[in-house]
Structure formats: C-alpha cells, structure tokens
Image: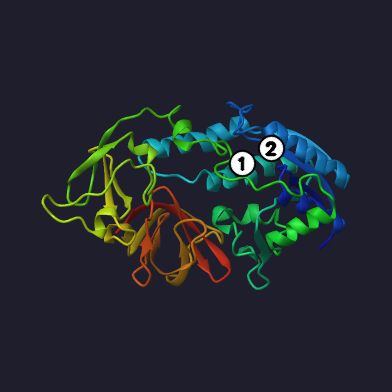
Amino acid sequence: MKKQRVVVGLSGGVDSAVTAHVLKQQGHEVVGIFMKNWEDDDDSEFCSSRQDFLDAASVADVLGIEIEHVNFAADYRDRVFAEFLHEYQAGRTPNPDVLCNAEIKFKAFLDHAMRLGAEKIATGHYARVRQNAATGLFELLKGVDNSKDQSYFLHRLNQAQLSKALFPIGHLCKTEVRRIAEELALPNAKKRDSTGICFIGERPFREFLNRYISKEPGPIVDDRGRKLGQHVGLSFYTLGQRSGLGIGGVKEKGAARGAGDHAPWFVARKDVAKNTLVVVQGHDHPWLLSAQVQADQASWVAGHAPALGNYGSKTRYRQPDAATQLVQADMGRFTLDCTAQPQWAVTPGQSAVLYDGEICLGGGIITAMA
C-alpha cells in the first residue's frame, strides 16, 4: 500500500492505540482524532470522556503523532440519540452502535478527516476491507477473531465510505493486540474494554432511559392470558429478556408443584396497543422462535441487493451465523426464511445482517417476524 495521510479515531482504548501504531509501522503519516460524542452528565462515574481523552493523548505522545479533540455531540444527538429515543418510545429495541458507525464515525468523522487532507481514515474495529479485483467493488469482511468480529455493526457502510476506510487490526486476535500494546509499553495496554452503549456506559439502563421516556405501567401476562404482575413501561423491556421481570412461577389451582413451576420467564411479545408485556416460560418456548424475519431500511454494501438464495445471517451481535434463505428483496425491504434454523428472540429494531461466508453483504432493521 502506498504511504498516505491517515486520520485515526483514537478513543483512549487499546484497539485504536494499536491501530495507530500499525499504521505508523507501515510508514503512513498518522494523525489522531478524539471524538467527543456525548455531553450530558459527561462528568459522571459512568460516562466520562475526560479520562478517555487523557488516555488517547498519552498514546499519541508515546507514538509521536498529533491528536485533535473534536466535538461531534450535536451530530450525535441529532442523528443517533433522537432515533434511539424514537425507537424505544415505539416499543422497539434499537442498536445505536450501528447508526453511530454510519452517521458519526464514517460520515461526520470522515468528512472532518477529509477537510484535514486525509486520504484514508482508520478505526480499531475488528473487521477488514478489500477491493474485489474482478468487480472493483469494496467488500466488508469479518474480523479474523470470531469472538471480536464487528462487521455486524458496520453493515450499513457504503462503497464511498469503505473506499476511504482502513481496519488495521482486523487480521489480529485481541490477545495479539494486547501483546503489542504491552510490548510498546502503551499507557492503556491493560485498560479494560468498554461495554454497553457508548453514551450510557455501564450505568443501570432503566435508570438512564427513565430520564427521557415517561413510564406507562401495564399488565404482564403469560401466553394463556393470565396476569402475573405489572411492568414499568414497555420501553424498558426487550424480547428475550429474562432478568428484572419481578414475577415468579405459576401453577394450576390445586395442582401439585412441579419442575416447570420454576422455569425462567422470558419476554416474548410487546403489545403496544394494549400496553401489555407478554412472557413465556422456558428458553425454547415456540413464541421465542422465528422461522421468518422481515427487515426494512435495507442497506447493501455493494449498492444493490444480493441475489436471492442461501446465506448466513445474524439477527443479533455475537450469535453464530444461521442458515438463512433470502426469499425477497426490493424497495428497501427484504425477507429471510429461517426455517432450517429458527432464530431465538428476534427483536424489532435490531439489525438482520446477511453474510456470504466471510463477506458481510449488508442488512436492515427488523420490523416483523413469524
């Protein structure tokens, strides 16, 4: 690869730090950008960007590169957080990290980097990009480390964005990234990975959401219509959720207590019209399994839908690829037949992402399942 001016998103974490190092080793002119995406209660114990910036600046100092602090909080609130709240208020469960990548890291950040004279941008994502020699199209590939692969979160990237993107650690395993950081004596070599949604951090999610969405309590019923308790608001629950329901077992009047009385409850449906939360007992209850998934807002990496046929798919991050058949794709919508491998707790608002082996083809937002 020819030597280029590359702007790296330095988050303060070890992945982006090693990303910058790899690029320097390759001889590129590397500039670091720290993105501040959230301002509300930023000084709290759960979500402080100050320490992250100090870590990023320390890494830049060790590597001998420039770093700039850029505030994208207004863009984040308008493009990501507003949609996040809208989806929760509608009873769906959005994935803001998918939208953040498409709207902030590979749009607002990319535009800023281009103004700085960058030829490419780079992030510490565990994914890969390559240009197909036959078609000339850019392809998004899974990261080599299956346990860390983040192509799911990047599936909305288009050809223009991928043509400017580098993922320098996509061919490495996390253990190797840690080893490199320790070998370089980077100040954040042992910093633990961040978890949860970036602007929420590790605070109690219900507590955070309660600030922005009003509570509308309603009944919790089982698959037979029996009332088991009361929920605090449909927005605060997601399909497949097991903990935090506040209900116990149920048995028929006069019947002897059996093992099934203590089987765990799972959220199976949310009836927004009746403000009712429906739960079922047992992980493998039929209401938790879907043989068909419909998605909207389709975004295909190649710029067009793939041919109908057999693929792998994910309806949530970290799940293994499931055997899937793409049976319909038009007008920004598509339908997946999962009969061969029914999917568990498919959740409206989450992303259904399609794969052809190691190639991420794109995906869309789940709207319905059956």
Residue behind mark 2: 35
Q: Which of the two residues, 39 or 252, is positioned nearer the viewer here? A: 252
Residue behind mark 1: 104
Q: Is residue 100 above or below residue 316?
A: above
Cα gap from disc 1 to disc 2, whole angstroms: 9 Å
Give the percent coordinates (x, y) of residue 215.
Answer: 35, 29
Give the percent coordinates (x, y) of residue 266.
Answer: 33, 51
Q: Earlier in the sequence, mark 1 or mark 2?
A: 2
Find numbered disc 2 in the image and state the secondary structure of the residue it sits on.
strand
Q: What's the image's color scheme?
A: rainbow
At a point 47% along the width and 56% down the height, the residue shown is 316
At a point 78% along the width and 43% down the height, the residue shown is 32
Q: Amino acid at mark 2?
A: Met
In the shown orientation, is residue 95 left or right of residue 146?
Answer: left
Tell me if residue 317 can be seen.
yes
Q: Amino acid at mark 1?
A: Ile
Q: Are the residues tagged 1 and 2 within 8 Å (C-beta)?
A: yes
In the shown orientation, is residue 305 left or right of residue 10?
Answer: left
Q: Which of the two residues, 273 or 102, is positioned nearer the viewer here? A: 273
Q: Is residue 77 above or below residue 157?
A: above
